């Protein structure tokens, strides 16, 4: 779980982004973002729904999906590309990369500062403009590897 100070900073940035985008800051939007901001596990919409359902019994899964799509459209959150069809989300917008375990699906953030300085291949120059580049590394985490061997 993210520390309270980091979550508070993300909430302030979120509120500022909502105001800038003329997006109402509803109780449901605020709680969905707060839950995502404090999560380190890159939860799916279904996971967020389950975590919030007791606190917000009138919240629907459809509302969670639509809210996440809105947040993503306004650049407030990121969708993490996974092999499986279930989308996973994060509120961490700093430049970083992901390790994904192909057994348990755990997603771990990592920094790779030298990657920022790597030029893209010349053969994609004609493609257009690139506004983001990141790496997804897939493999088997130590926990799953230990379970396989033991």
Image: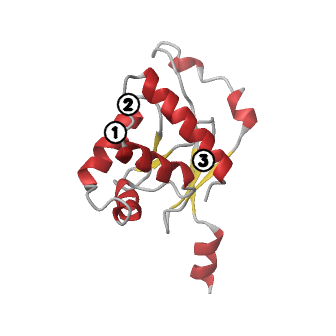
Q: Looking at the image, is 8 positioned above or below residue 117? A: below
Whole-angstrom CA distance, mark 1 to mark 2, is: 6 Å
> Which secondary structure lies at badge 3?
helix
Q: Looking at the image, is 47 positioned above or below residue 133? A: below
Q: Looking at the image, is 88 positioned above or below residue 116? A: below
Give residue 69's mark: 1
- Residue positioned 43% across, 50% down in the render: 31
> Which secondary structure lies at badge 2?
helix
- The image shows residue 131 at horizontal and vertical percentages of 53, 22
> Which secondary structure lies at badge 1?
helix
Q: Contact, CB < 8 Å: mark 1 with mark 2?
A: yes
- The image shows residue 48 at horizontal and vertical percentages of 40, 57
Whole-angstrom CA distance, mark 3 to mark 2, is: 21 Å
Residue under pointer 2: 73
- Residue positioned 40% across, 55% down in the render: 44
**What is the crowding at mark 2: few (fewer than 14 residues within 10 Å), some, or many (at least 20)?**
few
103 or 121: nearer the viewer: 103
- The image shows residue 83 at horizontal and vertical percentages of 42, 53
Give residue 7's mark: 3
Report the quarter where the C terminus lies.
Answer: bottom right
Q: Contact, CB < 8 Å: mark 3 with mark 2?
A: no
Closer to viewer: mark 1 or mark 3: 3
Q: Looking at the image, is 147 positioned above or below residue 76? A: below
Q: How is the image coloured?
A: secondary structure
Whole-angstrom CA distance, mark 1 to mark 3, is: 20 Å
């Amino acid at each position: 779980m993210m520390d309270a100070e980091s979550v508070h900073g993300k909430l302030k940035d979120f509120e500022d982004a909502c105001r800038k985008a003329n997006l109402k800051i509803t109780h449901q939007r605020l709680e969905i973002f707060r839950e995502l901001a404090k999560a380190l596990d890159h939860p799916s919409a279904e996971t967020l729904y389950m975590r919030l359902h007791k606190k917000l019994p009138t919240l629907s899964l459809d509302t969670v999906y639509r809210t996440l799509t809105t947040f993503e459209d306004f650049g407030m959150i990121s969708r993490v590309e996974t092999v499986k069809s279930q989308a996973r989300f994060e509120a961490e917008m700093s430049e970083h990369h992901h390790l994904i375990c192909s057994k348990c699906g755990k997603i771990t953030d990592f920094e790779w500062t030298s990657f920022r300085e790597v030029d893209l291949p010349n053969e994609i120059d004609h493609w257009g403009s690139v506004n983001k580049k990141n790496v997804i590394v897939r493999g088997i985490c130590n926990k799953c590897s230990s379970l396989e061997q033991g």
